[in-house]
Amino acid sequence: MGARLPGVERTFFCLKPDAIEKGLIGEIISRIERKGLEIIALKLVRVTRDQAERLYEEHRGKPFYEGLVEYITSGPSIPMVVRGVNAIRLMRNLSGATDPSEALPGTIRGDYAPGSPPGATIRNLVHASDSKEKAEREIAIFFKEEEIVE
Ligand code: CDP
Ligand code: MG
């Protein structure tokens, strides 16, 4: 439905383990639906170390990298593919700023993620791709094309 309309794109979005621990699955999915975006693939998984390293390749070597890999592999996550006009930008906007202390009320991180102590891994509930290239790369880490309902 609509995959080839102008401006329609797909993005990778993931509920991290803290979102599931806190019982926020329904709340976060509701926000995606209310915004008029379509979920075209979704599963519940324990992210493997290999998947985490591929997802966060760009951060390898940074001080927070090891803590980040530990965080995303610490419990179940829900990776998904979301489709819509400007889906990449919209999912970044719905998510809010990386640091929950900077994330505005009305965003997922702004409404539900507590502040992180300085130097600690930032537990901010969700991941959203930041470009078309990254979206396609990140989708491929978690989904085969035949698992995506286009
Ligand atoms: O997730 P987002 O694209 O907003 O942020 P990022 O800069 O790509 O960082 C990826 C993830 O690393 C963040 O979502 C945080 O969970 C974590 N992070 C951290 O623990 N400490 C930092 N100083 C920066 C990021
Ligand atoms: Mg990022």
Image (tube, rainbow, N blue to C red):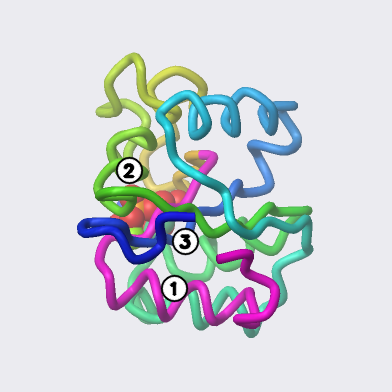
- Residue beneath disc 2: 98
Does ligand 1 reach within 8 Å of label 2's beta carbon? yes
Kindly identify the residue that appears in the image at 75 percent across and 35 percent down. 21
State the image coordinates of residue 111 (x, y, percent, origin top left). Answer: 44, 18
Whichever of labels 2 and 3 marks the residue nearer the N terminus, that label is: 3
Task: Give the secondary structure at mark 3.
Answer: strand
Please name the amino acid that badge 1 sits on: Tyr
Determine which residue is flagged by label 1. 56
Query: Residue 118 is drawn in which quadrant?
Result: top left
Q: Nearer the viewer, mark 2 or mark 3?
A: 3
Q: Quadrant of residue 62?
A: bottom left
Say which residue appears at 67% left-offset and 78% top-offset.
49
Quadrant of picture, ligand 1:
bottom left
Please tell me how crowded label 2 is: few (under 14), some (14-19), or many (20+) other residues with Cα within 10 Å. Answer: some
Q: Which mark is residue 12?
A: 3
Q: State the mark number for residue 100.
A: none
Image: 35 above or below 62? above
Dot 1 beta carbon under 8 Å from ligand 1: yes
Q: How far apart are marks 3 and 1 (CA)?
A: 13 Å
Amino acid type, callout 2? Thr
Q: How far apart are marks 1 and 2 (CA)?
A: 14 Å
Q: How many marks?
A: 3
| Viewer-side residue, 119 vs 51 | 51
Q: Which of marks 3 and 1 is nearer the N terminus?
A: 3
Q: Say which residue appears at 36% left-offset and 44% top-offset.
A: 91
Residue type highlighted by circle 3: Phe
Magenta residues? 125-150
Does the magenta run of residues contain 43?
no
Residue 11: x and y, percent? 41, 60
Confirm whether the magenta stretch covers residue 146: yes
The reply to whether the C-beta atoms of the residues labelled 1 and 2 are less than 8 Å apart is no
